[in-house]
Image (cartoon, grey):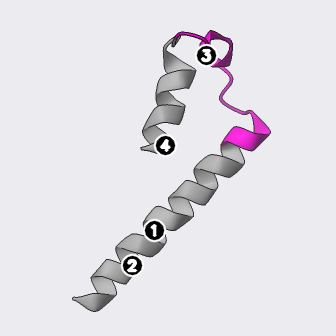
Amino acid sequence: MAIVGYIGTRSVAFPQLADDVGNWLEPLGIVAILAEAVVVIAAVNGVAARR
């Protein structure tokens, strides 16, 4: 959901978050998305290993 939220706030102006539209390469945003992706990949691998 964090990845979807990141894409949403960079694509559409949300109330009180309009200054992030188009700011795709914000360093903290990139780190957060990479961390979320690592967790999702680890979870998928964990579930797949149990089967």
Q: Amino acid at mark 1?
A: Ile
Q: Position of residue 23 (x, y in %)?
A: 68, 23
Residue denoted by label 2 = 45
Label whose residue precedes the other's in the sequence (4 or 1): 4
Residue denoted by label 4 = 3
CA separation, marks 4 and 1? 13 Å
> Hey, which residue is sitting farthest right in the picture?
27
User: Regarding mark 2 in the picture, which secondary structure is present there?
Assistant: helix
Label whose residue precedes the other's in the sequence (3 or 2): 3
User: Regarding mark 1 in the picture, which secondary structure is present there?
Assistant: helix
Query: Which quadrant is home to the C terminus?
Result: bottom left
Q: Is residue 4 above or below residue 22?
A: below
Q: Residue at x 49, y 43 (%)?
A: 2
Can you tell which mark lies on residue 17? Answer: 3
Q: Is 17 contained in the magenta span? A: yes
Q: Is residue 9 above or below residue 5?
A: above
Q: Position of residue 50 (x, y in %)?
A: 28, 90
Can you tell which mark lies on residue 41? Answer: 1
